[in-house]
Image (spheres, helix red, strand yellow):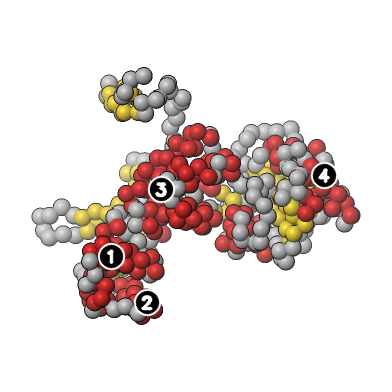
Amino acid sequence: MADKKYALMKWKDGWQEVVRVESDAIDFNKYYVIERKEYFGRVVINRPEGEVPGLIVIDRAPMEISEIVMVDGGDQRKLEQASTYQEGTRLEYHYDLQRGDARLVEKIKGEIGEVLSRRGISAREILSKPALEKAKEIGSIGKAVHVVGGKKQEDLIGFIELLLEEMA
Amino acid sequence: MALKGIKWVGIDFGQCLMSPSSLRNPHMFGDIGKLLGKQEMIPVWIDRMRRLKEKYKTYSLVKEKHREEILTFVLDNDREAYEIFGQKEPELLSMAPGLLEFLIWLNGEGIRPSVVSELKKTLGPVGTDMITKFLVIKGILKHFKYFITPHGKMDLDTGEKFERYKGTSKESGTLYDELLKELGKEGIRPEQCVMIGDKRSTDIIPPKKRGFVTIQYTGHVDEGPCEHSDYYGKTFFEVKEILQGL
């Protein structure tokens, strides 16, 4: 048995790709294609003139997002589906970004305050903990206030840390 | 139009009153990874779950008969992740199209249907198994009278359990034999009973052989025409129309 085995695939247009497979692979079982309607949201973020816009791709129930807030940036929006745009097979649902006083961050801060009070610890005490211990504590606060890191756990840690600094 | 000749309605659970089309791996494992702060594991878990599906052919079979491998193979024995998987499952599953409207209408007609399902685990209190948990989360428990399984029958109002169905099965038809004995005591005849389900081998052929009216639900899985199916419905809006015409 060879140590390394690869699946080599050739397309009708001549394109060829290779993918390493398990070294105990025997032969091919089947090939099938799934066709399914998928929805992806795209949050586009303005940056200074000349800079490429920021982009967050949303793959969790994108049509159900109701609010977005630029934390430490002041922009708070409520989302309202407004129009559609079709280009070939691609259909886009466009949303109105309605400015509003969503107070989402204040609500989360209030919930963090309650958690800290229940646990008998202050924001300052958490911020002064060693990095690993602090990350663990902050992760647990995130869980208690129902906020998770969308792409990385560091995003959650950084966000809660920011709020704790404001509360300290 | 009021129901005339129908006195009892049974509905299968998986791929019938419950639609798994909204339960997607990226959503499920995405939520688990984010809740545990293990975002880097999300694509790994999704890949393993897809491979497990290839091993056992369908996700239903993985979940019904090889569930422990979701813990051992997919989640690397991460019990916390597995617990969240169990909690999320009924949340992410959805009701078949038209189900709520159908249940409200049927209850209004004086019939509270029963869920008739091949539950694999022992029957515990309401909300401890996948099926009654789903009914509770979706707010439709009150529309059902009994939960009938090969592990026993449960009164969904009181939680009282009845042992007589133990050891029966839908596929062999013994579950329907027991059901007809019970209904017979209430003066209900087989032709006054309707069974709705997607699987011919468990929901259609055995009850039809015993004289039930059968409706093959094709909204999620369509097993194709069957000589034992009296009617076919793609949604519960259609199922309602069929019952109105009986």
The disc numbered 2 marks a residue on which chain? A
| Crowding at mark 1 (Cα within 10 Å: few <14, some 14-19, many 20+) | few
Q: Which image quarter holds the N terminus of chain B?
A: bottom right
Whole-percent x, y for residue B179 in the image: 81, 49
| Crowding at mark 2 (Cα within 10 Å: few <14, some 14-19, many 20+) | few
Q: Specify which label sits upstream in the sequence, 4 or 3.
A: 3
Name which residue lies at 38% across and 70% down: A145
Distance from the alpha carbon under mark 2 to that under mark 1: 15 Å
Whole-percent x, y for residue B19 in the image: 56, 49
Marks 4 and 3 belong to one chain: yes
Q: Which of marks 2 and 4 is in front?
A: 2
Q: Name the residue under label 2.
A: A119
| Crowding at mark 3 (Cα within 10 Å: few <14, some 14-19, many 20+) | some
- Give the left or right position of residue B131, taking residue A53 as reference: right
Distance from the alpha carbon under mark 4 to that under mark 1: 61 Å
Q: Which amino acid does label 4 sit on?
A: Asp
In depth, the one of B238 and A163 nearer the eye is: A163
In depth, the one of A54 and B168 nearer the eye is: B168
Q: Nearer the viewer, mark 4 or mark 1?
A: 1
Q: Mark 4 points at which residue?
A: B177
| Crowding at mark 4 (Cα within 10 Å: few <14, some 14-19, many 20+) | some
Q: Which amino acid does label 3 sit on?
A: Pro
In depth, the one of A84 and A105 nearer the eye is: A105
Name which residue lies at 46% across and 26% down: A30
Q: Name the residue under label 1.
A: A133
Q: What residue type is labelled 1?
A: Glu
Q: Residue B225 shows which numbered tag?
A: none
